[in-house]
Image (spheres, helix red, strand yellow):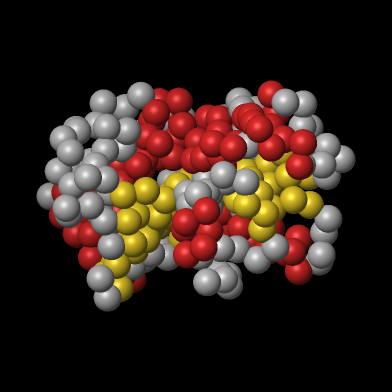
Amino acid sequence: DIYAAGDCVECTHMVTGQSCYVPLGSTANKQGRVAAAGICGREERFPGVLGSTVCKVFDHCVARTGLTESEARQVGYEVVTVLAPAPDRAHYMPQARPLLLKLVVDAKTRRLLGAQSAGPGAGDKRIDAAAMAITAGMTVDDIANADLAYAPPYSSAMDNLITAANIARNKLDGLMTGVTPMEVHRMLEEKKDFVFLDVRSPGEYEEVRLPNSTLIPLGALRQRLGELPQDKEIITFCKISLRGYEAALILASAGFKRVRVMDGGVVMWPYEKLQ
């Protein structure tokens, strides 16, 4: 018998079922154990990989598991994506650090297909949890109610992964319609006629703002609805688009029909910012 394991072999991707090449020390060690079991006469099988990876880039933790958005679309999935920036633990803790988290979800089954994270915050544990969720075939509904460990020095009361899962649920249930920063940027480049509504405070707006945006602070929105056109699309946002989501609900309740929320807000805007 000939046994091959580690960096010299392809693996099966556990989401797509397709062959993939992901040479990692973690995978090699697990496959080595399976090969050793076979050599010793025991039957053991290696189920495959998710491509879970983490690396340190300067002071940032960058990690991923499962499928990216483009990979999921390439193999035929209809996906819903989430961009969820937030501190990696209770915001009032001195060691809290920013963390950007993206989820890729199957729109038909609501199953988690992939997750990516970046930032100085603890992204590795969110990606590890996401990897277990993908392996178990969990939906975003399952993840949203997962009983994760909580204490302010280690996480928020609603963990980053749970928050992201709830955003995905809101989208899937029709409670909000999102739009990516990339699509908004394309609309601006093409000079599309829409209202790019910033609902942050005047102080935040003076510090940094996005091109072609209109400022109406969230607290004043109900009193200033008459300043907004009913016949144009309105895209709301704030620092992380939490207030942007609240603004979208206010607009919808006031009869505005074409309202979307920019995923991730100013924090996830990768283009020019005005100061």
Residue at 51% x, 40% y is 243
Up-down relation of residue 58 to residue 91 (above or below)? below
Quarter of the rendering containing residue 171: top right
Q: Residue at x 81, y 66 (%)?
A: 190
Q: Residue at x 37, y 61 (%)?
A: 118
Residue 18 falls left or right of residue 115: right
- Position of 134 with respect to 105 (left or right) is left
In the rendered image, which quarter is residue 71 located in? Answer: bottom right
Q: Residue at x 57, y 44 (%)?
A: 217
Q: How many marks?
A: 0
Instruction: Residue 85 in the image: state x and y as whole percent.
Output: 42, 51
Seen as rendered, the residue at the extreme right is: 231
The quadrant in which the N terminus is found is bottom left
Indicate the quadrant where residue 142 lies: top left
Residue 50 seen in the current view: no
Could you say where residue 130 lies in the image, as x and y percent from the top left?
36, 43
Q: Is 171 left or right of 98, judged from the image as shown? A: right
Left/right placement of residue 104 relative to residue 1 reads right
**Relative image position of residue 242 (x, y in whole percent):** 49, 40
Residue 186 visible at all = yes
| Residue 250 rendering spot, x and y as whole percentages | 63, 29
